[in-house]
Image (cartoon, grey):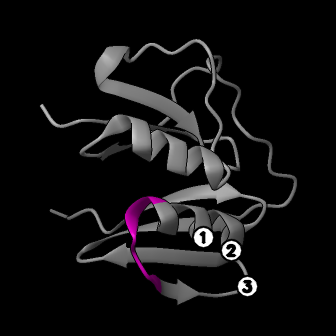
Amino acid sequence: MGTLGSVVLDCADPEQLAAFYQQVTGWPVTYRSESYVFIGEGPVRIGFQRVGGYRSPHWPEAGSRARLDFTVLELGPAVAALLATGASRPEPQVDGERGVTLLDPAGHPFRLAVPD
């Protein structure tokens, strides 16, 4: 069958969102065009697609949606660093002490969690 090559997020500004996720992952830009920016390391990439009239999802509403989950060694410092680079922390939080859901600058939810 197939293998996962990328996850693509819609947004108004691909450059801005790629720069934010570079802070999260440390990954380099691997592709850039007028409508797309991809970052990645290894076989999987995250892409950011320019969509005219983009409207961000609303937390915690909206039915099914995807989110990216990232593992961090220390939750507090990682959350603080990402809040300083443009993330926001929505309420309510439902992850308990092991994880935190944040919103990226385009409003997409993503989760930081410590390893099991």
Mark yes or no: residue 104 visible.
no
Amino acid bearing label 1:
Ala
Q: Are marks 2 and 1 in contact (CB under 8 Å)?
A: yes
Q: Residue at x 61, y 30 (%)?
A: 89
Mark yes or no: residue 2 visible.
yes
Q: Do the residues labelled 2 and 3 touch (CB within 8 Å)?
A: no
Q: Which quarter shows the C terminus?
A: top left
Using the image as rendered, state which of residue 1 and residue 58 is in the foreground.
Answer: 58
The answer to whether residue 76 is left or right of residue 65 is left
Image-quadrant location for residue 98 = top left
Residue that badge 1 annotates: 19
Residue that badge 2 annotates: 15
Percent coordinates x, y for residue 86 in the rendering: 68, 51
Secondary-structure class at tag 1: helix
Q: Nearer the viewer, mark 1 or mark 3?
A: 1
Q: Which residue is drawn at 20% across and 64% down?
A: 2
Q: What stretch is highlighted in magenta?
A: 24-29
Q: Distance between the residues labelled 2 and 3?
A: 9 Å
Q: How far apart are marks 1 and 3 (CA)?
A: 15 Å
Amino acid bearing label 3:
Glu
